[in-house]
């Protein structure tokens, strides 16, 4: 009898807590097959056919919830973990590597604390640039709409994000990370550690969405190559014509550590040319409803130069086409093809990489 009473009491406590906290478990499982052809310079070409996770969208699971405090105020949380659906392995070497966010919201807007994606990262809740201006928002595979936008920092630890209320369609954002990777060297909040700062604006008016972001990677003073802080100006948007939805994106960056699929600070490869980069990124895409599904086309172009030698440059071209067909609100099949070409002259000699991908897969959300 006592055991029955105890069990009822525990069940009632959990039921009450679930209602108060509104806890939800959610996720996406995305698995498919990818054929890749790659040729680098004069080397022999390589071919592969593999099963991969997260082709059209990352495989993930999460727990989120919140509580209404009254008078327009609330507290919520979101804990999101990434995994490889083809192996079951955890990603990011941490339980909740995708996002850990504690948010206080009210008439003033919202403030979030924890680990979050940056505004130009194609990752997380506050991905406003690529989420608005890039049709593929981070890309699929290495050659299908791969993201070559400047994003030296994708997700940052120790992040604070403030988002204003929406006024006349305009919403503002401010982000700052005291140390983007807590496991890296340097002291949190000091010049000895890599940090991140950014401000952004979005505008929504019917079928039109616009975004503008200025962000900076605050590089540690002891970095042998990245001695200057990276800066990027990002602009873009989309417009829904009904019969088609058009996307456009542009970036200008200085003192960047990554551009066009090339890591500028790879000292092992660029022993005498290790340097930061400056350049431009362009993206253009269109989504067209076909039957019950959607056909997507996109093209990307990057041109970047060494900060200390304008003759050393990288140019990247990428085109992609995909089709997604929804079986239901939670399950869809997809297929895509893409071509990527990188002309790399950072070492002073020309090296060309050509890559082609074809993919097909299944995605299910819960």
Image (cartoon, rainbow, N blue to C red):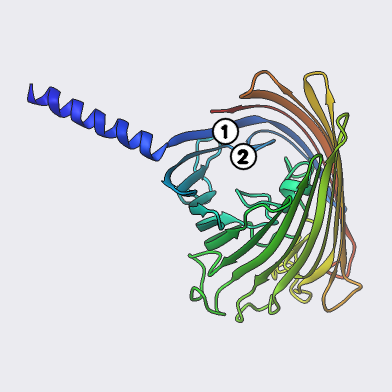
With respect to residue 328, does 153 lie above or below? below
Which residue corresponds to the image point at 82% horizontal and 18% vertical from the top-left?
291
Q: Residue at x 46, y 47 (%)?
A: 76
Label 2's element? loop
**Badge 2 vs badge 1, beta-carbon distance below 8 Å:** yes
- Where is residue 183? Give x, y as percent: 48, 65
- Residue underneath mark 2: 58
* Image point (67%, 24%), residue name: 332
Q: Quadrant of residue 346?
A: bottom right
Q: Quadrant of residue 245?
A: top right
Instruction: Indicate left or right for 86 with 265 as reference.
Output: left
In the rendered view, tell whether residue 81 sits above or below residue 223: above
Q: Secondary structure at mark 1?
A: strand
Q: Quadrant of the N terminus?
A: top left
Label 1 Cα neighbours within 10 Å, binned few <14 / some 14-19 / many ≥20: many
Where is residue 338 shown, x and y percent of the image? 83, 38
Residue under numbered circle 1: 28
Q: Residue at x 63, y 23 (%)?
A: 329
Q: CA distance from mark 2 to mark 1?
A: 7 Å
Between 177 and 104, the one lying in front of the other is: 104
């Amino acid at each position: 009898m006592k055991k029955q009473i105890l069990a009822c009491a525990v069940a009632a406590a959990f039921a009450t807590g679930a209602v108060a906290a509104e806890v939800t478990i959610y996720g996406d499982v995305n698995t498919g097959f990818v054929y890749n052809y790659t040729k680098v310079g004069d080397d022999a070409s390589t071919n592969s056919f593999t099963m991969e996770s997260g082709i059209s969208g990352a495989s993930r699971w999460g727990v989120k919830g919140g509580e209404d405090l009254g008078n327009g105020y609330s507290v919520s949380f979101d804990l999101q973990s990434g995994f490889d659906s083809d192996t079951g392995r955890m990603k990011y070497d941490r339980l909740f590597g995708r996002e850990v966010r504690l948010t206080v919201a009210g008439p003033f807007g919202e403030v979030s604390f924890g680990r979050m994606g940056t505004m130009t990262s194609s990752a997380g809740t506050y991905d406003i640039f690529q989420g608005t201006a890039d049709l593929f928002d981070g890309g699929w595979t290495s050659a299908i709409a791969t993201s070559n936008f400047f994003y030296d920092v994708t997700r940052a630890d120790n992040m604070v994000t403030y988002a204003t209320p929406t006024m006349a369609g305009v919403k503002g954002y401010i982000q700052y990370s005291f140390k983007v990777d807590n496991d890296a060297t340097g002291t949190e909040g000091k010049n000895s550690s890599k940090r991140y700062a950014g401000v952004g604006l979005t505008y929504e008016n019917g079928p039109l969405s616009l975004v503008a972001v200025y962000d900076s990677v605050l590089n540690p003073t002891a970095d042998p190559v990245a001695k200057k802080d990276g800066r990027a100006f990002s602009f873009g948007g989309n417009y829904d014509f009904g019969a088609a939805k058009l996307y456009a994106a542009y970036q200008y960056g200085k003192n960047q550590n990554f551009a066009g699929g090339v890591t500028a600070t790879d000292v092992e490869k660029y022993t005498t040319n290790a340097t930061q980069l400056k350049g431009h990124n362009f993206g253009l895409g269109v989504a067209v409803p076909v039957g019950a599904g959607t056909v997507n086309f996109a093209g990307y172009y990057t041109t970047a130069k060494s900060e200390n030698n304008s003759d050393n440059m990288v140019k990247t071209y990428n085109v992609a086409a995909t089709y997604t067909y929804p079986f239901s609100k939670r399950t869809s099949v997809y297929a895509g093809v893409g071509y990527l070409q990188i002309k790399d002259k950072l070492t002073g000699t020309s090296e060309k990489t050509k890559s082609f991908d074809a993919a097909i897969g299944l995605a299910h959300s819960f």
